[in-house]
Image (spheres, coloured by chain):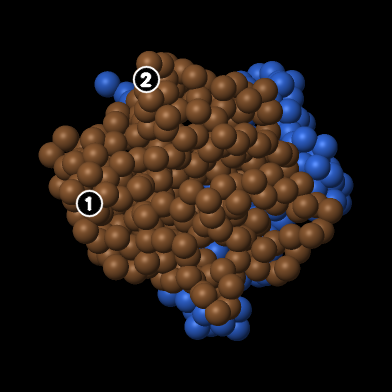
Chain colours: A blue, B brown
Amino acid sequence: MALDKPYRDIPGTTIFDAEQSRLGYHLNQFCMSLMRPQNRARFKADERAYLDQWPMTEEQKQAVLARDLNWCIRLGGNIYFLAKIGATDGKSFQQMAGSMTGMSEEEYRDMMISGGRSVEGNRRIGEDGSAQAHRQPQGRAGRKEGS
Amino acid sequence: MAQITASVYTSHVPAIGAALDLGKSNEPYWQPVFKGYDFSKQWLRENKPDVIFLVYNDHATAFSLEMIPTFAIGCAAEFEPADEGWGPRPVPLVKGHPELAAHIAQSVIQDDFDLTIVNKMPVDHGLTVPLSLMCGQPAPDNYEWPCPVIPFAVNVVQYPVPSGRRCYQLGRAIRKAVASFDAPLKVQIWGTGGMSHQLQGPRAGLINREWDTAFLDRLIADPAELAQLPHIDYVREAGSEGIELVMWLIARGAMGDESGPGTPRVVHRFYHVPASNTAVGHLILENT
């Protein structure tokens, strides 16, 4: 019998379950290594060479090099592990979270100051809230990159 | 005998720690957050416990994907503040209470909760930010936290995390364990994390004030029923990281029942949006 995964119908959200964890094991363990200052220095000196020491997939390495956190998460990354990359880059949690919405840093900060993202329309896939697939990217940063 | 005298509930947003450590607490953005804890700091000075049992989650700091304990109790004599990638927070070493921790582990495991006993682990912002919020920055000439702390780490990172019901029952078992410790200790239990927030994907930044407010109301007055809430409701309504709120149910479960003699009373309640990506919620309950 299949396992019950009711969280699959929430828009813009990936739940880090055992299946994602298995996919992302080496990606997340690479992130974990950045907790040590000497590893942060080695990674910064030559990112590609550092990544090549880990048995990650090529796509996972590309996602890290691109600093595309949504891509990393699709490949099994978890935000608390990925945050170590952001810390290495000197980024705050707000900058990291905002980067996944396509908003500029300012747009995202303003949304938070005005009370955050509303849950209305964002509870289930198929509604019409700001986190739904047909509304991406949400802001200037996403449009500028033309992705 | 030892007894649980009070419980504290608070968010543990890392940016709060960074704001304190970088001297930004008087900035207009942060002022309203810290103002909500002015009463709490005074209250803690006047109601200093002998031990704090601090329920929090490790954020991929002490526990990588090599090992993911669902419930881990820190039994060591001391715990070092972790380097989470930005360098360790400039806060005192956390002193443990090995005797009480070992006693609770023995009692709670015999009550069918399979705790992992941890004798060495660094502690991250999940544990040190609540201490900073409640205790302030320790003075240089007396550089220590006001009392020993037993860290109790709950897995809320990899699904499935423990249910609210399980957490609430675990709180009950901790209450029983503390009550059977043969020394007159005043113990506070703190439940941390939450409130609504989501740190990932296009839905990042989700906040649900209405849901948070109802959660606080029900935690005070109707916790046994609140504990029945399934995970999916937390994720859908309070964001993927809002699931941290199950940890508040451990602390609430360790307190007095919601009705009858000894019902806890609310001495402080605070709510503010935002701190970085997160809704900050805070409660203090005293057993009567």
Viewer-side residue, A52 vs B226: B226
Relative vertical location of residue B253 with respect to residue B26 in this rendering, above or below? above
Viewer-side residue, B227 vs B187: B187
Using a 10 Å C-alpha cutoff, classify the residue at mark 2 as few (fewer than 14 neighbours), some (14 to 19) or many (20 or more). few
Using a 10 Å C-alpha cutoff, classify the residue at mark 1 as few (fewer than 14 neighbours), some (14 to 19) or many (20 or more). few
Q: Are marks 1 and 2 on the same chain?
A: yes
Please, what secondary structure does the residue beneath circle 1 have?
loop
* Numbered tag placed on residue B183 in the rendering: 1
Q: Which residue is mark 2?
A: B261
Please, what secondary structure does the residue beneath circle 2 have?
loop
Query: Would you identify the image quadrant in which residue B77 lies?
Result: bottom left
Q: In the rendered view of the protein, which quadrant contains the C terminus of chain B?
A: top left
Query: Callout 2, which amino acid?
Result: Pro
* Numbered tag placed on residue B74 in the rendering: none
Camera sees residue B190: yes
Relative vertical location of residue B120 with respect to residue A131 in this rendering, above or below? below
Chain bearing mark 1? B
Does label 1 or label 2 sit earlier along the sequence? 1
Give how far across and how far down residue A24 sits, in percent. Answer: 43, 52
Along the horizontal axis of the image, is B212 left or right of B219?
right
Residue at left offset 74%, top offset 33%? A117
Residue at left offset 68%, top offset 28%? B209
Give how far across and how far down residue B248 sits, in percent. Answer: 46, 36
